[in-house]
Amino acid sequence: PPHDWTPSVSGALTPKNELYVMAGGGTLLYRANPDSNGGTYNSRVCYYGLSNYNANASSYNSTVFINTPITIDRYGSLYFGVQVTGSNPSSLVSSIVKIKYDGTSVIKPVTTAASDSGMSKVVHNCAPALSVDGTKLYVAVSNANGTNNGSGYLLCMNTSDMSTSAKVRLKDPKTGSDAGLHDDGTASPTVGTDGDVYFGVLENPFLSNHDRGWLLHFNSTLTTTKTPAAFGWDDTASVLPSSMVPGYTGTSTYLLMIKYNNYACCGGDGVNKVAVVDPKATQTDSITGVTVLKEVKVAPGVTADPEFVGSLPNAVREWCINTAAIDPIGRCIIVNSEDGKCYRWSMVTGTLSQVISLAPATGEAYTPTVIGPDGTVYAINNATLFAIGN
């Protein structure tokens, strides 16, 4: 069926429990008491000056857009990407923006940050990621201009002044061609506890890896390209301590949980899976022959896909996660499926030990799961947010 993958607009909380939400013209709405039952946003924040916005709001609203989620550091500074699609009174261009906790802004045009005049925007819906110590910011930029698919770089920027310290061209590990950076995706960089950086891309040529893409893997300074994982399309890796997995004998202190679909519509067998992979161990990918991160645990979906029941009887509905919720205490991972259900994947037994139905099965955008401080699980199905009792 046709899909509507319009990206979501989500808010972000600062360490002081202040809520920021994207608004028109590249502005943000701010609320000081988000837990209160009523009230309105306290004010509007604008990185290029609120007086400039107020004087020409309609012009900015039609040409300037925050096109990524908002990332907030431990001090309350905000980081996000802005896409500019036309002329405007302040001559703004597509940029990577930092609004400091004191209200001042640092604006880095994408072309300047990448040192490449061909780059046109931050990859759509790609949340910037902070290093463990907060001194580095990782963000992907693309040359997609008037299209929804491009290629580009992963940047490492210094959070102190937003200067670029390193960049790496994102490549397909098998072909060496520029990897695809698609606006329909929501892949964002993940930083491991050792500082390694992971970022999901599409393969090139398209469908040469069954539309699975790759989870590219770099060291913290982006100077060393390491072993990728066999899947990366529209996926943001989740980090779990290796101690969550009984019997794990590898050398890594953490593992990565990723989606592991093998799309029947794109040349795969339709046996869609989720996987935990080891960032310090390898195996040969059975589809491409490329050396990839080793699978530690794999779980296939359980609900038959009626679209392929005749041609591929083992095909199952896709896992529809972007990021998954990790529960180190319960030693489990919470994941969504396009069969309309939310699953608890036990690392102790390796099984999908519990399941709850949310809504009828539907083709949908990939969504995150989150565990609240009281143990409530939050999951999305078909654009509806569900709260699942602890």
Image (cartoon, rainbow, N blue to C red):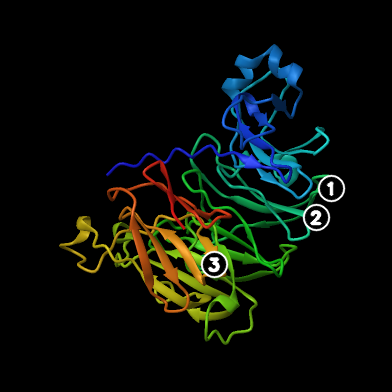
Occupied quadrant, residue 56 = top right
How far separated are the C-alphas under marks 3 and 2? 29 Å
Residue 306 has which mark?
none
Check the image and report above or below for 298 versus 64. below
Q: Which circle's residue, 1 or 2, is located before the other in the chain?
A: 2
What amino acid is labelled 2 in the image? Thr
Residue 135 has which mark?
2
- Residue linked to disc 1: 160
- The residue drawn where x is 65% and y is 37% is 19
- Horizontal and vertical percent position of residue 69: 60, 42
Q: Nearer the viewer, residue 335 or 386?
A: 386
How many other residues sit within 10 Å of disc 1, few (<14), some (14-19) or many (≥20)?
A: few
Q: Is residue 87 left or right of residue 323?
A: right
What amino acid is labelled 3 in the image? Pro
Q: Nearer the viewer, residue 358 or 29?
A: 358
Pointers 1 and 2 in contact (C-beta within 8 Å): yes
